[in-house]
Image: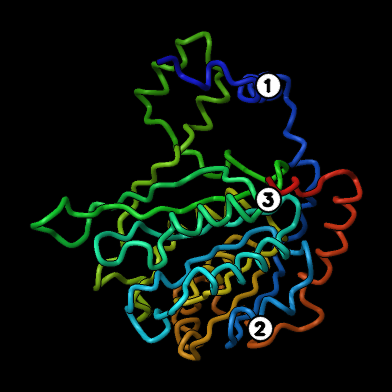
């Protein structure tokens, strides 16, 4: 079967646009600001109560690593997982800017756990009840993990990337993987390839080979399901821009806040467990931005309240949500 990308009008159009030195229309809708002074908060609160305080269309990126309902801890037990998840998914869509994205972590559940709250359930729900667009299903492939005897040992989790609209922001150049010198030399001989594209590196694809955090990892702060900084960093770099707002309403280990600080994004986060504040202190101690102040409340002067008016202007320019199917 032929490669679909060779016959995709959008793909061909983007190639032609790049060759002319142009940019996608979504990039014209964002305003990158001075990222040296950013604002951050991590609030101890229920996610639904917290989300109710965030303005419509004010957030560029949501990094969402929800409980999987596998009884890992008291916060990981929900009698009707989908009914609960539907509420925060609706709020997530409401607060996203027209150029915004939702990165939704999850895994597939098997045997007795199946259907209790896995990513398939959430994707199916969003396709029926949301106008957001599934841009990619990212497979996070890690070499380390538990062994198994009655099935093939699991070595992946998934991240479902949804764009609020077709104008979602995506900065591929910020996350390209460099070619080695031998590959560069070979590609430079190919007249079909532009030298500047070879220098930029390759698209990392939607299969990310990054290790999980071992129990003795220096990144560990104590949260049982902590995600690696490298994974969050790629999401933040690709799906948000300097001076934009990143939201994580299941803050957990507070790694999203750390990455937002390091990458020059504003951030807002919450977690129902007060211990997240202790995790935050450990995250800040591992950065070169340990002097950054992170508030324990969302003040009215946070940039998220200014972003709402900018998003309204974008919507007025003709960028809105697609109708529900």
Q: Which mark is nearer the camera, 3 or 2?
A: 3
Label 3 element class: loop
Residue 188 locus on image (x, y percent)? 47, 15
Which residue is pictured at 68% across the width and 45% down the height? 325
User: How far apart are the two marked residues, 3 and 2, measured between alpha carbons?
Assistant: 23 Å
Residue 204 vertical placement versus 71 (above, below): above
Residue 77 locus on image (x, y percent)? 40, 80
Q: Report crowding for label 1: few under 14, some 14 to 19, many 20 or more residues within 10 A (C-alpha).
A: few
Name which of mark 3 and mark 1 comes first in the sequence.
Answer: 1
Residue, disc 2: 49
Colour setting: rainbow
Which residue is pictured at 60% across the width and 76% down the height? 269
Whether tag 3 and tag 1 are in contact, CB under 8 A, the answer is no
Label 1 element class: helix
Residue, disc 1: 13
Residue, disc 3: 131
Q: Which mark is nearer the camera, 3 or 1?
A: 3
């Amino acid at each position: 079967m032929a490669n679909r990308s060779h016959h995709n009008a959008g793909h061909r159009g983007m190639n032609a646009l790049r060759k002319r030195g142009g940019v996608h229309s979504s990039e014209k809708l964002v305003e990158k600001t001075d990222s040296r002074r950013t604002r951050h908060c991590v609030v101890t609160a229920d996610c639904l109560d917290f989300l109710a305080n965030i303005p419509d269309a004010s957030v560029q990126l949501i990094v969402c690593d929800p409980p999987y309902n596998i009884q890992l801890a008291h916060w990981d037990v929900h009698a009707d997982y989908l009914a609960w998840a539907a509420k925060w998914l609706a709020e997530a869509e409401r607060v996203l800017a027209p150029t915004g994205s939702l990165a939704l972590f999850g895994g597939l559940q098997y045997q007795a756990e199946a259907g209790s709250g896995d990513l398939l359930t959430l994707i199916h729900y969003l396709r029926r009840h949301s106008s957001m667009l599934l841009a990619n299903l990212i497979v996070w492939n890690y070499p380390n993990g538990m062994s198994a005897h009655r099935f093939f040992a699991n070595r992946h989790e998934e991240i479902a990337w949804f764009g609020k609209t077709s104008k979602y922001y995506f900065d591929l150049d910020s996350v390209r993987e460099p070619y080695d010198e031998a590959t560069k030399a070979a590609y430079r001989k190919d007249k079909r390839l532009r030298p500047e594209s070879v220098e930029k590196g390759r698209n990392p694809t939607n299969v990310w080979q990054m290790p999980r955090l071992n129990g003795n990892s220096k990144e560990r702060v104590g949260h049982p399901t902590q995600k690696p900084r490298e994974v969050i960093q790629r999401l933040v770099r690709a799906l948000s821009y300097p001076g934009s707002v990143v939201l994580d309403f299941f803050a957990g280990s507070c790694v999203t806040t750390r990455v937002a600080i390091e990458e020059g994004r504003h951030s807002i986060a919450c977690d129902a467990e007060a211990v997240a504040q202790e995790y935050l202190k450990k995250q800040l101690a591992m950065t070169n931005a340990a002097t950054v102040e992170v508030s324990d409340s969302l003040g009215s002067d946070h940039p998220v309240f200014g972003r709402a008016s900018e998003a309204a202007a974008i919507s007025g320019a003709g960028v809105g949500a697609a109708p529900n199917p």
